[in-house]
Structure formats: C-alpha cells, structure tokens
Image (cartoon, rainbow, N blue to C red):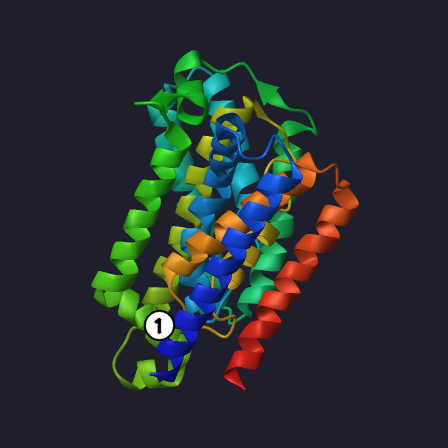
Amino acid sequence: MDKIKRSGIFTYGILVFLIVLFVALSFSSPYFFTAGNLTKVLRQVAVVGIVTVSMTMVILTGGIDLSVGSMLGLCAVVLAKLMVSGVNVALAIMITLVVGMILGLLNGFLINEIRISPLISTLGTMTIYSGITYIITGGKGIFGFSDKFSFIGQGYIFKVPVPIIILVLVYIFGFFILNNTRYGRYLYGIGANEKASVLSGVNVKKIKYMTYITSGLLSSLASVVMLSRVSSALPSLGSGLEFDVVTAVVLGGISVNGGEGKLQGVVIGLLIIAILSNGMILLGVGNYFQTVVKGLVLLIAVAIDNISKR
C-alpha cells in the first residue's frame, strides 16, 4: 500500500514539473510552442520512447540494459546493409528484428547462465556491439534507401507522424503486458523479491530471458524508425541513447531497485527529457552544458527515489 501511494505521489509530482517546464519554455522562446516544433519533439521522442518500454521491464526485475544504444546502432547497420544489397524492405526489417532478439538473448545468457551482473554484462556487450558496428561499416555511413522505407520515419497517417503511431502502439503493448498478464506480475515480483519468486514456483530465468529478448526486439524496432528518419546508417547511431532511456524511466518513477513503478509515469518522464532537450537547444544552451543538466536530472530522480523509501 505504501509503495502504491508513494508511486502515485511521485507521478503527480513529475506531472506538475512537466507542466511548469512546458509553460516556462513557452514564455522563454517564441519558437517552442509552435505546431512545427512540437511535432518535431514528438517525432524525435519516438525512438527513445520505444526503448523505454523494454527498459521499464528490465529495471522492474532489478536489472538494467546499457547495451540498448549499441544494439540500435548495430541493428541499423545490419538493416542498411541488407537494403543496399537489394533485399526487400519488409524482409530486411524482419531480419533486423530477429537480429535484435538474438542480441538480447545473448545478454540474457550472460546474466542467467554465466551469472554476470546485468550492469557488467550489458556494459560489456555495449562495447562489443559498438565495435562490431564500426568493423562492419569501416567507420563510414551507409545510405541510399528507397522512398518506401523513408515513410516509416518521415511519413504521416491522417496528419499524425508514423513514428508517433508506432510509439503509441508500443506503449499500448507495454501497458497490456504490465497490467493484464501473469508475465507482468512476475516482473514486479522478481524485482521486489527474487528469492520469494523462486520459492513460489516462478521460472525466474525464463522471465529474465524474455525480458532481455524484448529489450533487443524493441531496440531493433527503434533502429528501423531512426534509420528511416535520418536516412543514413552512421556507426555512431544510437550512441548515448541508453542514458536518455534510463533517465526517462527512473524520472518516471520506476525504482532502480526493481519491483516498483508504473509505465504511465515513464510517459511523463519521457516527455520531460524530450522537452528539456528541445528547450535547451532553442535557448542556445551548449551541448556540454546540456549533458551536465541531464546528468543532474538523473541523479535527482534517483535521490528522490531513495529518499522516498527512507
């Protein structure tokens, strides 16, 4: 009961912060509260948002996946290579999604079978996946895709950007999984008390495998959206994504210790990160200072989580 109450208060607090931030930026910059800029913000937030759903699941189990950015970059390069080689776009996307799942499966194997902590496991694979990406590309970008593919990242359906439609569908999937399935309840149970979950007959290994495979799947889906939007598979694509994803999730009230938090809070955290980044750009804040601000936001979110528990 205390956890539910605390989670509700946290969600309410960050919602108020989001409103204050939105109003402040609307007065600070004449370019912020415009249809073009807000559409741009939503389109850009789609990539990070897709990955926040799987990261929420991972952190709920008490784990973390630092390799999401590198998985996105590697999957984007695989997809680009396939398409420039003449592979059908739909088939190339399906193969890319499978590759993402395999990368996530490797993370799950290291954590479940080799017993390496999620932090170290995914830190290692983050470096490995990034290195493979540079080996494949030779440090150069890959481009020259069909107009059909660009529709995914740049097109509209009934004046709504396609990336936003994809993001909404992914969040609907996440809400359903966490609130209406046994698997979702197991995620919370494992994060709250893994030993109790094992004693209750829950196949913890299987749940963790599924969670990290989902992380790979959604990272690869995000790579499809991003590659379609930027139209060039650079080896640095996805670099630093994991920081924005983790910040949005923790800021949204998902406890870093696992077993606590709601996906609706993550939506608010995601919007705060997106609006904050866009606002700092419009106000002419330097890139280095933006990094400092984002780091402070992450530390404040974790501090509030720990203080609320005490």
Instruction: Give the residue at the far front of this rendering.
Output: 27
In the rendered structure, the answer to whether residue 285 lies left or right of residue 308 reads right
Is residue 132 visible in the rendered structure shown here?
Answer: no
Quadrant in the rendering for residue 183: bottom left
Q: Nearer the viewer, residue 194 or 33?
A: 33
Name the image quarter holding the C terminus: bottom right
Where residue 42 appears, x then y in whole percent? 47, 36
Residue found at x 25% / y 80%:
201
Image spot of residue 290 (x, y percent): 72, 47
Compared to 284, does 307 lie above or below?
below
> Mark 1 = which residue?
188
Task: Specify the amino acid type for callout 1.
Answer: Tyr
Instruction: Indicate left or right for 139 with 278 as reference.
Output: right
| Residue 270 location (% of width, % of height) | 49, 50
Q: Which part of the image, by quadrant, shows the N terminus? A: bottom left
Question: Can residue 262 be seen?
Answer: yes
Quadrant of res 282: top right
The residue located at (38%, 83%) in the rendering is 2
Element at label 1: helix
Q: Nearer the viewer, residue 146 or 100?
A: 146
Give the camera-side residue of 156 and 47.
Answer: 156
Using a 10 Å C-alpha cutoff, classify the residue at mark 1 as few (fewer than 14 neighbours), some (14 to 19) or many (20 or more). Answer: many
Vertical placement of 64 versus 271: above or below?
below
